[in-house]
Amino acid sequence: MKNNIKKWYLTEYPNDDLGKEINPKSNFKKLLKHIPNFYEYIGVQDSLLRERIFLEFANRTELSYECILNIWLSIFLK
């Protein structure tokens, strides 16, 4: 459960039904690699869900939320 995004999300946000749709194979260890295709990797296109996952990822790494968001935006907005 430690690195599994879906399990973490469902524990933190049990009332958010979108959490049930998260790819069960997605994990925080591989998230940075998948920032360019974040929505495909997670399996859900929702900005609130993305923000929550990015915030948790920032808490687990030495990267700030702003850094993670800027990496995603620089790729996503191309």
Image (cartoon, rainbow, N blue to C red):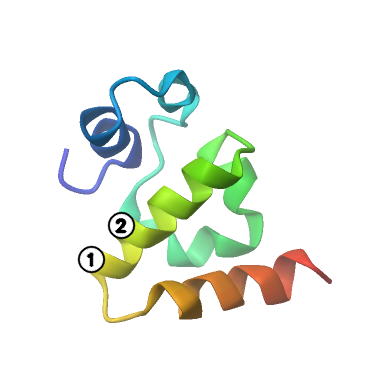
Q: How far across and how far down the image is residue 27, in percent?
A: 34, 47
Identify the residue at horizontal 64%, vertical 63% (top origin).
36
Q: Secondary structure at mark 2?
A: helix
Q: Amino acid at mark 2?
A: Glu
Q: CA distance from mark 2 to mark 1?
A: 6 Å
Q: Secondary structure at mark 1?
A: helix
42 displayed left or right of 28: right
Identify the residue at horizontal 63%, vertical 42% (top origin).
40
Which numbered marker is on residue 60?
A: 1
12 displayed left or right of 32: left
Q: Amino acid at mark 1?
A: Arg
Q: Are marks 2 and 1 in contact (CB under 8 Å)?
A: yes
Identify the residue at horizontal 29%, vertical 28% (top origin).
10
Query: Are there few (<14), some (14-19), or many (20+) residues within 10 Å of tag 1?
Result: few
Q: How far across and how far down the image is residue 55, in percent?
A: 36, 60
Q: How far across and how far down the image is residue 1, in percent?
A: 17, 38
Residue under pointer 2: 56
Q: Nearer the viewer, residue 27 or 50?
A: 50
